Amino acid sequence: MLFMKHIILHPKPIDLYKEFKFRVKWEGHYVAGVSQVTVLKGTAGAVIPPAARNDATRIMSPQRSQYEPISMERGVTHDNEFVKWANATRHSNDHPGSIPPPADFRKNIIIEVFDEAGRFAESYEIFRCWVSDFQVLPDLDGNASAILIQSVKIENEGWKRDTEVTEPTEPLFTEPSR
């Protein structure tokens, strides 16, 4: 039997975006020094409705989605917003009878992805995030030359891609005038 491969030609090449071209922002401001963000990952488990349990075909339905925490790392800077946000959820558990976290301890975060030329390519909004784990300083070593890194583990309630963001256009080359 002869199999033929189908080749789909696109009118323009599709660029694959690099993982190192991104920025993170919340409340309209970019977060200084973010160098790593872990994957956006969600799962929807399967459930068999009670009516289908005795059926030989077992029709399954998706369960409620669950979203894995996101971790972020950044170099220590003088920008204190990262630390203030991390401390907002931590202070209520430090002392019995203490006040609950402030109303704004949850933030929506936006991750912007750029193409290799630095043009804005994609955007994801992550909903109702809060810090569940915070490392303010790494191990300190007087013999090392590495930069200080802070990290946070962020719980979230899902995300969506901003479909209003369009693919960047390639600049056109024009012949220089004579």
Image: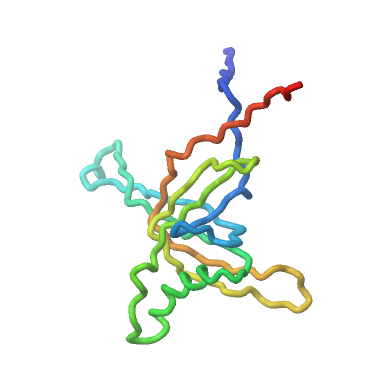
Residue 34 figure quarter: bottom right
- 42 displayed left or right of 10: left
**Number of numbered discs on residues:** 0
Q: Residue reaching furthest left? A: 51
- 117 displayed left or right of 87: right
Q: Nearer the viewer, residue 53 or 10?
A: 10
- 55 displayed left or right of 30: left
Q: Residue reaching furthest bottom? A: 96
Residue 149 figure quarter: bottom right
In the image, residue 115 sits, relative to residue 100, either above or below, namely above
Q: Position of residue 26 (x, y in %)?
A: 46, 59
Q: Position of residue 82 (x, y in %)?
A: 52, 68
Q: Position of residue 56 (x, y in %)?
A: 28, 37
Q: Residue reaching furthest right? A: 143
In the image, residue 98 sits, relative to residue 45, either above or below, namely below
Q: Nearer the viewer, residue 89 or 116?
A: 116
| Residue at 40% from the left image edge and 53% from the top image edge | 158
State which quarter of the image contains the C terminus: top right
In the image, residue 152 sits, relative to residue 14, either above or below, namely below
Residue 38 figure quarter: bottom right
Q: Position of residue 165 (x, y in %)?
A: 47, 39
| Residue at 61% from the left image edge and 31% from the top image edge | 170
State which quarter of the image contains the N terminus: top right
Q: Residue reaching furthest top? A: 2
| Residue at 59% from the left image edge and 41% from the top image edge | 119
Colouring scheme, one of rainbow, by chain, secondary structure, one colour: rainbow
In the image, residue 34 sits, relative to residue 132, either above or below, namely above
| Residue at 42% from the left image edge and 65% from the top image edge | 130
